[in-house]
C-alpha cells in the first residue's frame, strides 16, 4: 500500500492546480511544498509527517473549516484542487473540485466575480463572461483587438481563459495583465473547438438559443461560451444548472469606455485604487447587495438606447419626486437577501436551511413592493411597475409558500429544520424522538421520586452513553436494577435495562430523523434550485428598483436634475458640477456647450484653475445620464454619445508613477482610431510628456484630425497656448478659459518650456515637481514615439510637417480651416518668444488676427506669463514688433474686460501689478 504522502503527490502530479487539499479522515491536509505555501499564506502550523523513510512538512484544517482557507488562497490568486475520500469505507481519494478565482462560489460581498473566456478568430473576437455566484452569463462578438480588450476589461474579471489564438499573443497577454488583476488560465484547447463548444452551449441553454440571441454557431462568441461552460463544469463547482440564460449583446449597446477612461473618470475606484471617492461609492445608496452590483454595472455600461435611458429617467423621476414613497420603497427592499447568489448556492447544493429560509423571506418582498408601487399614483404610472411585471408573481408566491410551509421559523434550531405538519413521517419520528428525549430529560427527577436518592444526575458521554450518576454517600441505597458501570472519585455511574432500551431507541430515532430531514431538505433545495431562473428574475427586478431608488435618493439630496435627451449631437449643460468633487468643496458651477459647429473646445487657464475637473465633470454628466441617472447641473440637454474617451497627459500621470509618454501616445492613438462623430473626447494636456515643440506638433496635428476627420465632440485642455490660434481658423474649434477669481489659485508661469515643470497647489503650500525630460539630440523623439504607438499615419506625418515649419519659423497652414481651400490661413510661431503671427507675411493685418487669438484667452494670466518667460529664456525679442503689439493688446483686452463692480480692490491691485510687469518687461 502506498502512503498518504505518496497518494497526495500522485494526485498533485495529475492536476494543474497550484495547491492540493486532500481529505484525510476529518481533516484536509496539505503536504510537502503545498504545506509550506499554505503555512506562509495562511499562517497555519506546519508539522512533520514521515513516510517511507522520508519526512514531509504537513499542515491541515478540519473538514468544516476548509471554506475560509479555500477562499483566502483563491483570493490570493491560487487555484486549489480538493481531493475527497470516495466514501466512508473507501479511503482512496479523487479530485472532486478545483477552486479557481473565477469560479469561487464562496465569494462574499456585493461585487460581481467574472470568469471571461476570450477567443480570436481572425479579426472577430468572442467573449463569454460568467459569474458563477449569480448565474449571469453574457456573450458578445466584437471586431478588433482594442475593442475586445476594452470590453473584457469592463467585466473586471477574476480569471481569464485565453483561447488558443490568444495564448501566444504576448501583446494581448500583456494588455490583460495591465488592465486586469485576473488570473490567466490555460484551459484545454479542445474545449474551444468550434463544433464541440457550440454543442456545449446548445446542451446548456437549449437548441434554439444561439439563433434566438443572434450568436453564430461555431463563431468566436459561441466558442468562448462553450469553453467557459466546459471550464465551469470541470472545476466541479456544481452551478451549471444555475446558468439558466445566456444574454448576448452587441458592442454598440453600450457606451464605449476604454480602461483608461474608466480609470480617469474614477468610476469604481480612485486613481489610488480606493473605492471611497469613486463615482460608484459616491452614488451608492442601495440597500441590497444585488442593487449595489446593479448600480455599478450601470455606471460601467451606460447604454446607447434612447428608450432605455428614458425609461430609467422616468423611474428616477417618479422616485425622486416623492421622498415618503421613496423611503417606503427602500424600506421594503432593505435587508432583502441576494437572490441571484442564493439561486447559485441552491443549485450547487451548498445552500443550508437558513439560506433557503432567506429565499422565502426575500420573495415575500415582491408582493409588498408591488403594493407599495400601486399605492402611489406617481409610482404606479411610472415604468417601475413594468420591472416587477417581469417576474412571474404567481410562481414566486408558490415557491415562497412551499418554502414557508416546509421550514421551521428558525430552521436548524431546537425544533429541527422543518415545521410540524409538513411531513407525516417526519412528524411521527419527531414525536417519538421528542418522547425519548423527554424521558431522559425527566429521568433524574423520576429516579429521585421513585427512590430515596437525592444526589442524582443524568448525563451522557461518548464512551458510557447515558448514565445515572449517584454520589458516594448514597450509593448503598441504589435499587437492584441499577447496574454499576463506572466508579469515580465522588460518585458511581449506573445503567438499567430500560435505559439501554431507551438509548437504543434514541440513537435509532436520531438517525431516522436526521435521514428524513436530509431527504426532505434535499428535495426542498432541489425544488428551489429548479426555480433558479425565477429567483434570478426576482433578484434582478429587486436590484433594479434598488439601483433606481439609489439614483433618486442621490438626486434629491444633491439637487440633481433630469437630463433632456436631444435628437442631435448637441450638449448644453447649464451650471454643471462635478458629482464627486461637489461632495467635498464649495463647487463653482460651470456651463458647457458643444454643438456641431462648436465641437472642439480648447480649454486654457492656469494650473489648479479647474480645467481637468471641468472636462471630467462634462464627461461624467454624459455618462451619468446614459447610465440612467439624473445629473449634477441646473439643466442639461444632451445628445446621446456612442463612446467617451479620455486621456490625461503623461506628466500628470507620471506624477502618479504610472505612465510613460509611450502609453500616452498609445492611448491617443486608440482615441483617434475609435472615436466617431457621436463620441465625446477629453484630452487633458496631451503631448505634454515630451519636449515642447514636438509636443505642440502632435497636439496640433491631432486637433486637426479630430476636428476634420473624426468630428467628435472634444474638450482639449492644453498648456500649448499656441493651440488657441486654431480657434479662429477651424470652424468647429472654440477657445474657452477658466477664470480664476480666488487669489489662492493664482499661480506662476509654467508651460511651454522644454523642461516640464508642474506645480501642485494644495491650499497653502506649493510644491514643484520636476521631471527630467528625455533629451536626445533628436528633438522629434515625441513624434517617433507617436508613430510607434500607432497614431494614424496622417497625424504623424502632419506632426512632422508642423514641427519642421515651427523650427524653420515658417508659416503653418491650418488644414480644414474655416476659410476653406481658396485662401489658406497661416500661422507662424516664434519658438523663442512663444509668440504667434498669422498670414504668410505676418503683416499688420495678420497681426490683428493674432491679437484676436490671444484676446480669446486674454484673461488667462498664464498666457502673458508664458510669453514673458519665453522672452526671458531667449534673452531677446525675436518675435519683433508684431509680437510686442500682441502682448500689449492682450493686456489692453484684459483691462477692458475687468468687471470693476465685481472685483475686490486687492485683486485689482494685484492685476494692475501684473499688467505693469508684463508691459515693462517688454519695454526693457
Ligand atoms: P487644473 O486641471 O486646471 O490644474 P484641476 O481641475 O485639477 O485644475 O482642479 C484643481 C483643484 O481645484 C482641484 O482640487 C479641484 O477640486 C478644485 N476645483 C476644480 N474645479 C472646481 C470648481 N468648479 N469649484 C470648486 N473647486 C474646483
Ligand atoms: Mg489638470
Image (tube, rainbow, N blue to C red):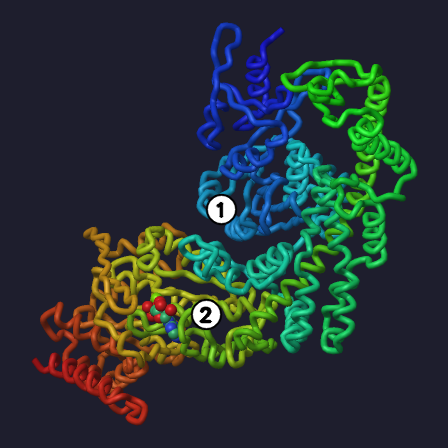
Residue 243 screen position, x and y as percent: 72, 44
In-image side of 410 versus 109 (left or right):
right
Callout 1: 10 Å neighbours few (<14), some, many (20+)?
Answer: some
**Picture quarter containing residue 236?**
top right
Q: CA distance from mark 1 to mark 2?
A: 29 Å
Please, is residue 518 above or below residue 582 in the view?
Answer: above
Residue at 59% over, 24% down: 28
Query: Does residue 581 show up?
Result: yes
Residue 736 screen position, x and y as percent: 37, 78
- The residue identified by callout 2 is 583
Compare marks 1 and 2 and give the one earlier in the sequence. Answer: 1
- The residue identified by callout 1 is 180
Residue at 59% over, 78% down: 564
Q: Viewer-proximal residue, 466 or 784? A: 466
Please, is residue 921 above or below residue 79 in the view?
Answer: below
Residue 456 screen position, x and y as percent: 74, 26
* Badge 1 element: loop
Residue 25, numbered label? none
Query: Does residue 167 show up?
Result: no
Is the shortest distance between ligand 1 and the CB of mark 2 under 8 Å?
no
In-image side of 346 versus 893 (left or right):
right
In-image side of 38 versus 824 (left or right):
right
Residue 206 screen position, x and y as percent: 79, 44
**Quarter of the figure with the C terminus:** bottom left
Amino acid at each position: 500500500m502506498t502512503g498518504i504522502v505518496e497518494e497526495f503527490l500522485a494526485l498533485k502530479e495529475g492536476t494543474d492546480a497550484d495547491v492540493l487539499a486532500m481529505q484525510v479522515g476529518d481533516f484536509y491536509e496539505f503536504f510537502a511544498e503545498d504545506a509550506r505555501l499554505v503555512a506562509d499564506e495562511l499562517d497555519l502550523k506546519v508539522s512533520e509527517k514521515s513516510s517511507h523513510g522520508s519526512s514531509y512538512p504537513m499542515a491541515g484544517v478540519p473538514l468544516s473549516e476548509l471554506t475560509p482557507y479555500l477562499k483566502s488562497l483563491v483570493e490570493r490568486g491560487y487555484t486549489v484542487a480538493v481531493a475527497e475520500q470516495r466514501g466512508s469505507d473507501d479511503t482512496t481519494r479523487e479530485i472532486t473540485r478545483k477552486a479557481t478565482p473565477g469560479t469561487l462560489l464562496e465569494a462574499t460581498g456585493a461585487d460581481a466575480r467574472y470568469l471571461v473566456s476570450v477567443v480570436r478568430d481572425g479579426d472577430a473576437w468572442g467573449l463569454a463572461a460568467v459569474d458563477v455566484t449569480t448565474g449571469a452569463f453574457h456573450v458578445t462578438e466584437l471586431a478588433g483587438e482594442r475593442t475586445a480588450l476594452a470590453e473584457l476589461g469592463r467585466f473586471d474579471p477574476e480569471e481569464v481563459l485565453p483561447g488558443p489564438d490568444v495564448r501566444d499573443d504576448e501583446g494581448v497577454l500583456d494588455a490583460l495583465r495591465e488592465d486586469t488583476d485576473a488570473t490567466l488560465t490555460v484551459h484545454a484547447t479542445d474545449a474551444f473547438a468550434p463544433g464541440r463548444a457550440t454543442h456545449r452551449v446548445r446542451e446548456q441553454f437549449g437548441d434554439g438559443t444561439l439563433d434566438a440571441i443572434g450568436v453564430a454557431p461555431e463563431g468566436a462568441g459561441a466558442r468562448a461560451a462553450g469553453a467557459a461552460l466546459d471550464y465551469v463544469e470541470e472545476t466541479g463547482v456544481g452551478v451549471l444548472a444555475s446558468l439558466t440564460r445566456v444574454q448576448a449583446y452587441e458592442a454598440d449597446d453600450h457606451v464605449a469606455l476604454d480602461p483608461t477612461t474608466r480609470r480617469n473618470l474614477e468610476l469604481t475606484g480612485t486613481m489610488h485604487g480606493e473605492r471611497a471617492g469613486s463615482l460608484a461609492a459616491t452614488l451608492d445608496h442601495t440597500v441590497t447587495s444585488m442593487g449595489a452590483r446593479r448600480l455599478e454595472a450601470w455606471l460601467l455600461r451606460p447604454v446607447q438606447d434612447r428608450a432605455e435611458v428614458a425609461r430609467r429617467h422616468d423611474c428616477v423621476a417618479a422616485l425622486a419626486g416623492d421622498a415618503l414613497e421613496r423611503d417606503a420603497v427602500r424600506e421594503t427592499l432593505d435587508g432583502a437577501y441576494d437572490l441571484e447568489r442564493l439561486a447559485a448556492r441552491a443549485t450547487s447544493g451548498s445552500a443550508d436551511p437558513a439560506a433557503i429560509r432567506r429565499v422565502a423571506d426575500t420573495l415575500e418582498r415582491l408582493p409588498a413592493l408591488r403594493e407599495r408601487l400601486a399605492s402611489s399614483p406617481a409610482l404606479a404610472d411610472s415604468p417601475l411597475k413594468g420591472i416587477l411585471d417581469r417576474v412571474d408573481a404567481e410562481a414566486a408566491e408558490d415557491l415562497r409558500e412551499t418554502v414557508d410551509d416546509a421550514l421551521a421559523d428558525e430552521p436548524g434550531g431546537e425544533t429541527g429544520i422543518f415545521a410540524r405538519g409538513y411531513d407525516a413521517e417526519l412528524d411521527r419520528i419527531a414525536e417519538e424522538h421528542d418522547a425519548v428525549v423527554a424521558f431522559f430529560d425527566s429521568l433524574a427527577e423520576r429516579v429521585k421520586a421513585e427512590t430515596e436518592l437525592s444526589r442524582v444526575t443524568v448525563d451522557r458521554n461518548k464512551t458510557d452513553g447515558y448514565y445515572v450518576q449517584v454520589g458516594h454517600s448514597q450509593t448503598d441505597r441504589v435499587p437492584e436494577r441499577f447496574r454499576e458501570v463506572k466508579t469515580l472519585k465522588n460518585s458511581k455511574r449506573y445503567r438499567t435495562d430500560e435505559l439501554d432500551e431507551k438509548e437504543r431507541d434514541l440513537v435509532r430515532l436520531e438517525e431516522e430523523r436526521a435521514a428524513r430531514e436530509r431527504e426532505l431538505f434535499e428535495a426542498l433545495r432541489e425544488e428551489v434550485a429548479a426555480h433558479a431562473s425565477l429567483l434570478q428574475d426576482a433578484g434582478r427586478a429587486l436590484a433594479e428598483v434598488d439601483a433606481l431608488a439609489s439614483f433618486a435618493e442621490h438626486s434629491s439630496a444633491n439637487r440633481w436634475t433630469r437630463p433632456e435627451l436631444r435628437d442631435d449631437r448637441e450638449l448644453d449643460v447649464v451650471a454643471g458640477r462635478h458629482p464627486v468633487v461637489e461632495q467635498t468643496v464649495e463647487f463653482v458651477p460651470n456651463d458647457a456647450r458643444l454643438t456641431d459647429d462648436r465641437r472642439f473646445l480648447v480649454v486654457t487657464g492656469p494650473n489648479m484653475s479647474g480645467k481637468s475637473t471641468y472636462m471630467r465633470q462634462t464627461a461624467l454628466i454624459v455618462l451619468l445620464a446614459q447610465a440612467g441617472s439624473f445629473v449634477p447641473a441646473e439643466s442639461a440637454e444632451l445628445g446621446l454619445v456612442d463612446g467617451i474617451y479620455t486621456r490625461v497627459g503623461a506628466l500628470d500621470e507620471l506624477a502618479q508613477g504610472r505612465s510613460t509618454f509611450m502609453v500616452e501616445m498609445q492611448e491617443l492613438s486608440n482615441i483617434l482610431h475609435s472615436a466617431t462623430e457621436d463620441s465625446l473626447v477629453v484630452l487633458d494636456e496631451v503631448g505634454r510628456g515630451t519636449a515642447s515643440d514636438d509636443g505642440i506638433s502632435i497636439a496640433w496635428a491631432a486637433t486637426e484630425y479630430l476636428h476634420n476627420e473624426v468630428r467628435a465632440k472634444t474638450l482639449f485642455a492644453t498648456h500649448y497656448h499656441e493651440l488657441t490660434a486654431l480657434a479662429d481658423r477651424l470652424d468647429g474649434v472654440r477657445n474657452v478659459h477658466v477664470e480664476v477669481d480666488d487669489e489662492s489659485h493664482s499661480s506662476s508661469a509654467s508651460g511651454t518650456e522644454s523642461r516640464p515643470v508642474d506645480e501642485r497647489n494644495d491650499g497653502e503650500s506649493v510644491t514643484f515637481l520636476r521631471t527630467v525630460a528625455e533629451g536626445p539630440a533628436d528633438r522629434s523623439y515625441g513624434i517617433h514615439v507617436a508613430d510607434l504607438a500607432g497614431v494614424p499615419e496622417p497625424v504623424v506625418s502632419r506632426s512632422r510637417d508642423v514641427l519642421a515649419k515651427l523650427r524653420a519659423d515658417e508659416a503653418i497652414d491650418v488644414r480644414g480651416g474655416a476659410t476653406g481651400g481658396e485662401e489658406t490661413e497661416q500661422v507662424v510661431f516664434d519658438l523663442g518668444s512663444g509668440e504667434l503671427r498669422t498670414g504668410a507675411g505676418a503683416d499688420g493685418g495678420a497681426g490683428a488676427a493674432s491679437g484676436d487669438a490671444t484676446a480669446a484667452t486674454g484673461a488667462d494670466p498664464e498666457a502673458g506669463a508664458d510669453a514673458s518667460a519665453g522672452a526671458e529664456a531667449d534673452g531677446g525679442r525675436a518675435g519683433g514688433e508684431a509680437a510686442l503689439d500682441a502682448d500689449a493688446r492682450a493686456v489692453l483686452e484684459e483691462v477692458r474686460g475687468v468687471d470693476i463692480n465685481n472685483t475686490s480692490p486687492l485683486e485689482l491691485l494685484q492685476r494692475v501689478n501684473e499688467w505693469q510687469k508684463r508691459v515693462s518687461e517688454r519695454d526693457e
